[in-house]
Amino acid sequence: RLREMDREDRIRACYQHACLKYVMRAYMTNSSIRERFGIDEHNKAQASRIIKEAVESERILPYDPKAATKLMKYIPFWAK
């Protein structure tokens, strides 16, 4: 299904995932995005690109911008 998505679809899905995680009192991470989209562990960069697109579109924000990249968590833009 990920292959059928265009850029806007991926950003929207990433944003919605961040919203769901937030209301469940959790954070979106690279790992949770990989699980959501069915991306294999060895394709972490693909998940990172999706997250980067969503951050650049300002739909999601880093929870702690100073955190190490490996430990980064994300929230919806309205949760800050």
Image (cartoon, rainbow, N blue to C red):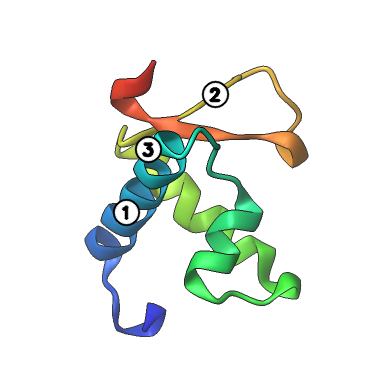
| Residue 15 x/y as whole percent | 33, 46
Mark 2 vs mark 1, CA separation in Å = 17 Å
Quarter of the image where the C terminus is located: top left
Please name whichever residue, 12 or 23, is drawn nearer the observer in this view of the structure.
23
User: Marks 1 and 2: in contact by CB < 8 Å?
Assistant: no
Circle 2 residue: 63
| Label 2 environment density (alpha carbons within 10 Å; few <14, some 14–19, many ≥20) | some
* 71 to the left or right of 64: right
Marks 2/3: CA–CA distance: 15 Å
Across and down, in percent, residue 8 comes to: 23, 59
Residue 69 vs 32, above or below: the answer is above
Give the mark toward the camera: 2 or 3. Answer: 2
Image vertical order of residue 44 relative to residue 3, above or below = above
Identity, as a three-letter code, of the amino acid under mark 3: Glu
Q: Which residue is mark 1?
A: 11
Label 3, secondary structure: give it.
Answer: helix
Residue, disc 3: 56
In the picture, measured across the screen, residue 39 lies left or right of residue 75, that is right
Verify CB contact (< 8 Å) between mark 2 and mark 3. Answer: no
